Amino acid sequence: MQLEDFTGKFVDCLSAVPATPVDGGTHFKKLEEWSSIFALIVIAMVDSEYGKTLTSEDIRNANTINDLFVIIQSK
C-alpha cells in the first residue's frame, strides 16, 4: 500500500471534488466535505480495499491523511 494510492481512494470517497488539492498532509477533518457519514464511508473503504478495520477512535486520533495511512499500516 502506497500513500498516493490511499489518498486517491480517500478522495474517491468524497461526494464532491475538494476545492483544494488533497495529499498526505491534508487535515481531512477540515475539509468542507468531512462529516460523520464520510467517516463511515472511509471506514468501509479501508475494510473493503485493504482488509483492515479502522475504528472511530483511529479517526479521532488522526489529523492528516498520512496519520490514517500510518494507523492502517500498523494494523
Image (tube, rainbow, N blue to C red):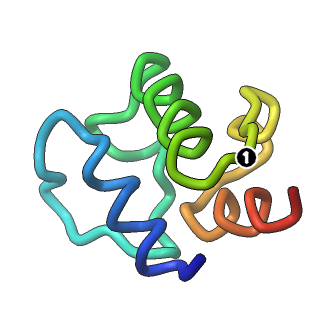
Judging depth in this view, the residue of 65 and 40 nearest the camera is: 40
Q: Position of residue 16 (x, y in %)?
A: 12, 40
Residue at 61%, 70% (x, y): give it: 66
In the image, is residue 33 above or below residue 23? above
Residue farthest to the top, as pictured: 37
Residue under label 1: 52
Residue at 64%, 54% (x, y): give it: 63
In the image, is residue 51 above or below residue 69? above
Three-letter code for the amino acid on which mark 1 is drawn: Lys
Residue at 75%, 38% (x, y): give it: 53
Does residue 56 appear to the left or right of 10 in the view shown?
Answer: right
Judging depth in this view, the residue of 48 and 20 nearest the camera is: 48
In the image, is residue 19 above or below residue 3? above
The C terminus sits in image quarter: bottom right
Does residue 12 appear to the left or right of 31 in the view shown?
Answer: left
Judging depth in this view, the residue of 61 and 2 nearest the camera is: 2
SS class, disc 1: loop
Residue farthest to the right, as pictured: 74
Q: Position of residue 28 (x, y in %)?
A: 47, 51
Q: For the image shown, how many numbered marks are present on the structure? A: 1
Does residue 4 appear to the left or right of 68 in the view shown?
Answer: left
Residue at 61%, 39% (x, y): give it: 47
Q: Position of residue 5 (x, y in %)?
A: 42, 74
Residue 50, located in which quarter of the rendered image?
bottom right
Are there few (<14), some (14-19), or many (20+) residues within 10 Å of tag 1?
some
Q: Position of residue 68 (x, y in %)?
A: 66, 57
The N terminus sits in image quarter: bottom right
In the image, is residue 23 above or below residue 64? below
